[in-house]
Amino acid sequence: MKLLSALLLLALSPTQTAAFAPANNHAVVKAAPSETALQMGPPPSESLLAETYGEGSRKYRRTVYTHNEWVKHRSSDRFIRNISSMINSGVYKSLGREVFATTAIATFLVVFNAITGGYTDFDGVQHEAILTALPQLTLPLTPFTLLSPSLGLLLVFRTNSSYGRWDEARKFWGLNINHTRDLNRMATAWYGHDGIPVDPALRAEHLRQVSLMTWAFVRSMKRHLSPPAEDEEAFVAELNARLAPEQADAIIAAAHRPNRALYDLSVAIDRLPMHFMRKNEINKNLSIFEDTLGGSERLLSSPVPLFYSRHTARFLSTWLLLLPFAMYEPFKGSWNHVMEIPAIALASLFLFGIEELATQLEEPFTILPMQGFCDKIGANCDEIVGWRGQGLDE
């Protein structure tokens, strides 16, 4: 009964994402401006309930693991911890209406069939049907058994393709992290050529510009891939805080901000006094940045083909909405078939949950810790350009 009560609470809770509800009925959660500090982990206790699921919760899914998190992740009590937190799951709360719909059908079916086919009271006494003119509502289980493999294949492909998109987006940012370090390392080590004396102050300024423009590119890319309401204010504030006014204004005013920041980085590299062959090697990193930017734009603008997603959702919804009729007879061993109700609720929760996970992963950028990546890149580049380089070793 505790499990049934928890499922009913989950189903009746207000939701933001529902397959059977119009998109414009979602509760609107005003996202707070992004901060430089990494936002991850569970929402603070003072947060609105609406931010624990749906769109408002995505900023809390930007997790970054260290050794301590991995120890907890693979601990032996992870199964108990995950089961005990089911009623607090943001994914399950997003499915409240779907689970309520299938559970309501199962409840109606148990009551209706008891009225039309007879029932057993609490004392174990069997009673005749109240409405003898109406038949009991049931379906054979065989069609659902035959269709189960097909539904499973659809869900597997749906989740695999969505995870592949998340993995590709994460690899793009991994390339950004790696090649920003590579770019600044080469610029720092190769500064100067042909034995020409190096002015330490001019060198520091040139390399500082390379570091700043490197950060400006990834920060502009993060803003380019984030919702304006979440990141615009913080983006403008960060650029104004770190860049010269004319540099910040040029990037902010650009129609395509990452392209402008990449152009400024190219100009900063061109100013470095070094052999052109070395500059060519450094500029190869900028081509990689163009690739990661273009690949990210492709992921953001092109979802999994909509007809596939819609067919999967329709198949799954129809299958689960009709499942109570096929599951009525198998539960004849329980009192008035009542155990069908929690069984349908659980089946709906888990199967709808698979589709919900795929939908949440399909657009990966708002669940990636991009702000943390930008902060890491900025800190690493600032450190690298502060090292002594060619001509300053002694």
Image (cartoon, grey):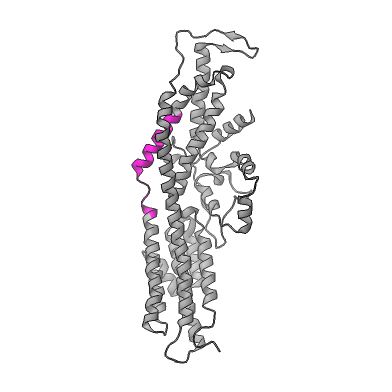
| Residue 22 visible in the snapshot | no
Residue plotted at (45% across, 28% down): 321
Number of disc labels? 0
| Residue 86 visible in the snapshot | yes
Q: x and y percent of residue 244 in the render?
A: 47, 75
Above or below 261: residue 389: below
The main secondary structure of the magenta stretch is helix
Above or below 386: residue 226: above
Q: x and y percent of residue 118 in the render?
A: 53, 11
Residue plotted at (51% across, 26% down): 104
Tell me if 64 is positioned left or right of 363 in this view: right
Q: Which residues are magenta?
A: 299-320
Q: x and y percent of residue 305 in the render?
A: 35, 45
Residue plotted at (46% across, 14% down): 136
Query: Is 154 a magenta residue?
Result: no
- The quarter holding residue 335 reads top right
Q: x and y percent of residue 299 in the render?
A: 39, 54
